[in-house]
Amino acid sequence: MEVPRDVGPKAPEVLVPASVDFDIVNLSLDGRFLYWAHRGEKGLLEVPIGGGPPVTLVAGTEDPVTSLAADATYLYFTTGHRVDTEASDMLLGRRSPRAGHFEGVVNRLKKEPGAKVEEIASGRFRPEDVAVDATNVYWINSKKDAILVRQPLGQVDSQAVVTHGNFLPGSFVVSGGFGYWIDLDAGPAVVRVSTNGGEPQKVATSTSTSGIGHPVRLAADDAAVYLTDAGSVEGKGSVLRVAVAGGAATLLADNLNAPRAVAVRGGWVYWLNKGTGAKNFLDGSLEKAPVTGGPKVTLAAGLAAPERLAVGDTRVAWTEVTGAIKDMAR
């Protein structure tokens, strides 16, 4: 693990200007590019970290992207569409939104110029929360009885069920041989399961003494899982760390204004605060603190309701409600 360091605050840079298409699904950051996806017409895009015009990798279609993840070689994203709608067209003279059935799709795209989208899984499921590690790609099949599935890298339509659960959308992460998520039926609680399968275990549960009441997002490394908690009222949010070895949650930061996304990298935990309603959420911020505890550092303030977060080797990037994407040295 890198030794925590703080090189001092730097001014944010605008990688992508404000846009009316602000429904950004997720961000991914590597040493060269920032990648992101829109649910709308813009599709899947990249922009050089040093700045430059965005490049469309997958054009937007009627099939919205629902989640995005990446490893060193590929981007993975989930989408889907309705099929077998012809009978509705003939009967009604138009396409009913309930006609046919929904077919989910999991795709991958190599990080190289001119690469073509590869479909790696499809079927009657609604995929979301895609994630990847060194051996598998994972996603949630969202339905009444939602399941977490895995599929070995490089294989097609060979998914296996890992476990069942009530997964808070956007909360699934994988690290150190475990998948973690916020389970709404369990407290709510932070739950983990071996990526090889087995019985899910509660890592941290909402109680009067745990400091956990309204968990929002998760991040994880080999040693611990980190969570943002919105708190019972505005201004009472927090960031907590729960060691994989067990024990009580450790408070890393408190009295936060609506903390949202969280990430961990190089001995630091990073998070976004949405801000306060009294200021129309134009007082959001990006902050960090050492994973072992210590004073928090405000990296950027005056942000417009920041929501999505990605941390790379040297940069940290985030989205704002205006549709802008910004980054800065971490």
Image (cartoon, grey):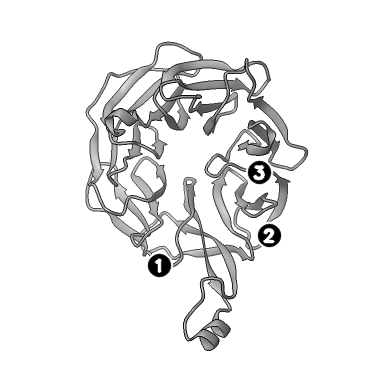
Q: Nearer the viewer, mark 3 or mark 2?
A: 3
**Image spot of residue 279 (x, y percent):** 27, 29
- State the image coordinates of residue 112 (x, y, percent, origin top left): 39, 56
| Sequence-first disc among 3 and 2 | 2
Residue 325, relative to residue 290: is it above or below? below
* SS state under label 3: loop
Q: Are marks 2 and 1 in contact (CB under 8 Å)?
A: no
Q: Is residue 171 left or right of residue 145?
A: left
Q: Residues within 10 Å of mark 3 (few under 14, many from 20)?
A: some
Q: Residue at x 60, y 21 (%)?
A: 242
Compared to residue 247, the image places residue 265 above or below, namely: below
Q: Nearer the viewer, mark 2 or mark 1?
A: 1
| 84 versus 261 height, above or below | below
x then y, percent, for residue 120: 58, 62
Q: Which numbered tag is attached to residue 76?
A: none
**To which quarter of the image does residue 15 belong?**
top left
* Residue occupying the point 59% across, 67% down: 103
Mark 3 vs mark 1, CA separation in Å: 29 Å
Q: Separation of disc 2 and disc 1 at Cα?
A: 26 Å
Q: Earlier in the sequence, mark 2 or mark 1?
A: 1
Query: In this orientation, does residue 180 appear?
Result: no
Q: Which mark is residue 61?
A: 1
Q: Where does label 3 land, which residue?
A: 166
Residue at (56% x, 15% y) in the render = 250
Q: Which residue is mark 2?
A: 158
